[in-house]
Image (spheres, helix red, strand yellow):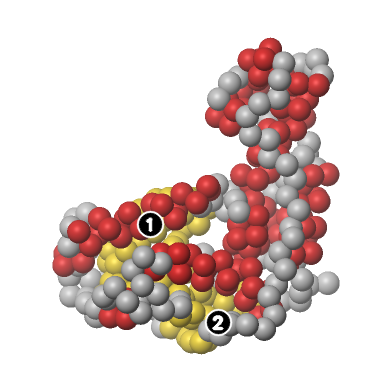
Amino acid sequence: MNYVTCIQRTLDYIEENLETQITLEKLAEIACFSPFHYHRVFQAMVGESVMNYVRKRRLTRAAERLFFTDEKVIDIALDVGFQYQESFNRAFKKFYDVSPKQYRNARRISGPLRGKAYLTITLLSGGNKMEPKLVTKPAFYVIGYELKTKNEGGQNNKDIPEFWQQYMQNGLGSKIPNPLNENAELGICTDFNPETGEFVYVIGMEVEEGTPAPEGTVYRSFPELEYAVFTTPKSNEESFTSSIQSTWNYVFTEWFPESGYEHYGSMEFELYDKRCYGSENKEIDIYIPVKKQTVKA
């Protein structure tokens, strides 16, 4: 399956239907992916969540019409998918820092104009490739600390390293009761909201089922799943974070398109153990739940 073609097909559909209702489920159907897998692949290839991309394209279309026509604001708002002028005004001002009326009166196009995305990704052949291990991990239980973040504008790439820094500096791991392995910490991405790009990131350790969670922590349970496990390239302290981020990008832009698998579930996690101690040759494992891809007619 050609992922670039699949995602570009949905970009074309979005462009042709900016003035009608667009749902994640419909776009996933066009791409022949599950909604969650489509959301993750789209994010990796386009650089923002699906519905945020749709919202920006609609606001750009509205800005162009405000500038080039004398149509009523309410008519433009309704045409680009907003039910009420008030909600359109709020979204427009958040994106452009001015109201639709102020934008029109300025008589100049300004602010961010999100053009239609055209994918030019070329999947690599040859060279160094990361080949994952496929493992079945039994159900497991975690106590830890959670952070709400989002992948818009790379916000998660800023929030999560800072969260880890706070966790380490404050010795929060020592407050987790009876961990099964005190040298193995998990960074779990879960509770994804494909509509907004928001998700919850949990730092914690595995514990026995039913272990009481101390105040200020959370208890989470996860079912048995099959995982593709990727080990990040060895790196020093300075490049460690970028090594992790580039591995995530590789998974969704290069490995998945050629693998015959798709993402399964709404969580994924990183395993930090003794291999990432010290300042040299640091590496971690990334666990992504997978299932064999269903070929759709």
Instruction: Write down the quadrant of residue 70 in the picture.
Output: top right
The amino acid pointed to by label 1 is Ile
Front-most of residues 263 and 154: 154
Decide: marks 2, 1 in contact (CB < 8 A)?
Answer: no
Task: Please identify, in this view, whether the residue under mark 2 or under mark 1 is nearer the observer.
Answer: 2
Front-most of residues 120 and 66: 120
The amino acid pointed to by label 2 is Met
Quadrant containing the C terminus in the rendered view = bottom right
Say which residue appears at 53% left-offset and 48% top-offset: 152
Say which residue appears at 39% left-offset and 68% top-offset: 240
* Residue at the disc numbered 1: 160
Q: In this view, does 171 lie to the left or right of 149?
A: left
Per the image, label 1 sits on a secondary structure element best described as: helix
287 up-or-down from 191: above or below: below
Say which residue appears at 44% left-offset and 53% top-offset: 156
> Residue 95: x, y in percent?
58, 31
Q: In this view, does 292 lie to the left or right of 164?
A: right
Q: Distance between the residues labelled 2 and 1?
A: 24 Å
> Residue 244: x, y in percent?
45, 68
10 up-or-down from 1: above or below: above
Q: Is residue 201 visible?
A: yes
Q: In this view, does 183 lie to the left or right of 235?
A: left
> Residue 202: x, y in percent?
35, 61
Instruction: Write down the quadrant of residue 171 in the picture.
Output: bottom left
Q: Residues within 10 Å of mark 1 (few under 14, many from 20)?
A: some
> Residue 267: x, y in percent?
48, 66
Give whichever of discs 2 and 1 has the lower sequence position: 2
205 up-or-down from 127: above or below: above
* Residue at the disc numbered 2: 130
Q: Can residue 284 be seen in this view?
A: no
Q: How crowded is mark 2: few (under 14 residues within 10 Å), some or many (20 or more)?
A: some
Per the image, label 2 sits on a secondary structure element best described as: loop
